[in-house]
Amino acid sequence: MEIYTQMTNAGLLVSMKGALDGLSEEKIKNQLKVVLQQNRKFLFLDFAGVTDVTPAGLRNLLPYVQQVQQQKKELILYNLKDNIHGLVKSSGFDSLVKVVDSLDTAIKYVRAKNLT
């Protein structure tokens, strides 16, 4: 699992590449810890480069989802492949984060949230 970050006007963009599984826990822990220190209200996770997700991989993200919520930030997932979106939905993970189809949709969502 490789993680890349980029600051944008809308929030912090995090691109992931590789498999999100039980073996990627240490890499995710080290890199997302740095990401959460950034002072951005919205964190965008780009799943376009994610090749596979397991239930254990989703569980690895839970501590970060909780930190994001405690910091009054919002995590937005986008570019999920159909099988990954199905796992996110069936596991109930989509009740903890916002899931949208694309970065454009995510940015529109953020703009609408900032207006209210």
Image (spheres, rainbow, N blue to C red):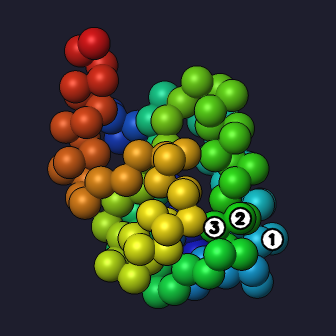
> Taking 112 as reference, is 54 left or right?
right
Question: Amino acid type of disc 3?
Answer: Leu
Q: Cβ–Cβ below 8 Å for labels 2 and 3?
A: yes
**Number of residues whose C-alpha sits closer than 10 Å to that of mark 2, classed few (under 14), some (14–19) or many (20 or more):** some
Label 3 element class: helix
Residue neighbourhood size for the residue with mark 1, other residues' Cα within 10 Å, grouped as few (<14), some (14–19), many (≥20): few
Q: Position of residue 100 (x, y in %)?
A: 30, 54
> Element type at marker 2?
helix
| Amino acid carrying mark 1 in the image | Glu
Tag 1 or tag 3, which sits nearer the N-term?
1
Look at mark 3 in the image and give the residue it sits on.
58
Could you tell me residue 37's position as x and y percent? 68, 37
Numbered badge on residue 79: none
Q: Which of label 3 and label 1 is nearer to you?
A: 3
Which of pointers 2 and 1 lies earlier in the amino acid sequence? 1
For the N terminus, the image quarter is: bottom right
